[in-house]
Image (cartoon, rainbow, N blue to C red):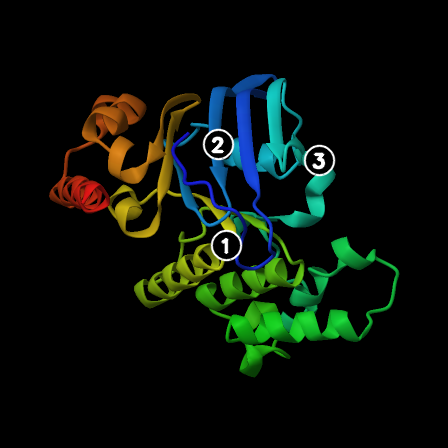
Amino acid sequence: MSHEIHDECDHCGHHHELVVDGLVVDYRKTRAVENVSLATSCGNCVAFVGPNGAGKSTLLKSIAGLLRPTVGNILWRGTKVGKWSREIAYLPQREQIDWSFPITVRGVVEMGRYPQTGWWKSFNKNDDEVVEQAIDEMQLRDLADRQISELSGGQQQRAFIARALAQEAHVLLLDEPFTGLDRPAQEGLVTVLERLSTEGRLVIASHHELATVPDIFDEVLIMATHQVAYGNVSEVFTWENISAAYGDGLRRSPDLEAAFARAQENSQEVGV
């Protein structure tokens, strides 16, 4: 087990652990995920990396409870993950969202309360306060009454993260959250994810920019349908593991070489 065990999360006062054990998932009669096992806990920021079709999105959906495993178990707090749907927030890829749907930023954030309140109950004072706090945490106050379609890509991502905060989720599952964002928006999102993990939430994201993995994530799962490697970025983010997942088509670019070097530097710092 690669992660550090701590007694409690800063934001909730408990220690929570996610365990994926021998997971196999068949999706539309195709084996999408095969023999994946990992264990991580709140306070970590974890990347799922691998080529297109590697099963990253399927694995995220399985953890979110949206797909049923064929074999294996997914446990949160020691029991099957389906029991804890209110504590897990899933953010799909941006192109899978209908941004033309007529809803404001505040409306999106309010949707985060429904797993806690139910769809038909009125909000009480606490619900309103949680929504407003999430809006402020994601710096969306000036945009709260804007239509979601009017926002930039980075602002839209912040709105959906605010929805997860309003849900009071312990686990945030993000599918390619950086895709389509310009450089400032990417940097802003990195800051948000770092803060969320520092606060004690577990952040898991599928990610395709290999060169930025050591700069954003603590742990990495490298996969190509099956699990190639999993552990601390400083230990498993190597050319051998990456090339085993991506095959001969992956070019050993200067940016990727620099990323491997930064991962090793982090390893040496940890060892000091």
Q: Earlier in the sequence, mark 1 or mark 3?
A: 3
Q: Is residue 69 above or below residue 167?
A: above
Amino acid type at image mark 3? Gly
Q: Tell me the CA gap for discs 2 and 1.
A: 16 Å
In percent of width and height, residue 270 lies at 24, 44
Q: Where is residue 84, by image quadrant?
A: top right
Q: How many marks?
A: 3
* Residue where numbered disc 2 is placed: 39
| The C terminus - image quarter | top left
* Residue where numbered disc 3 is placed: 82
Q: Tell me the CA gap for discs 2 and 3.
A: 17 Å
Q: Where is residue 28, by image quadrant?
A: top right
Q: Earlier in the sequence, mark 2 or mark 3?
A: 2
In percent of width and height, residue 11 lies at 56, 59
| Residue depth check, mark 2 versus mark 3: number of the one nearer the observer | 2
**The residue positioned farthest toward the left in the image shown:** 254
Q: Is residue 28 visible?
A: no
For the residue pair 163 and 203, the one nearer the viewer reads as 203
Q: Is residue 8 above or below residue 223?
A: below
Asked if the residues shown at circle 1 and circle 3 are in contact, with their CB atoms under 8 angstroms apart, the answer is no
Circle 3 crowding by C-alpha within 10 Å: few under 14, some 14–19, many from 20: some
Secondary structure found at label 2: strand
Q: Where is residue 122, by image quadrant?
A: bottom right
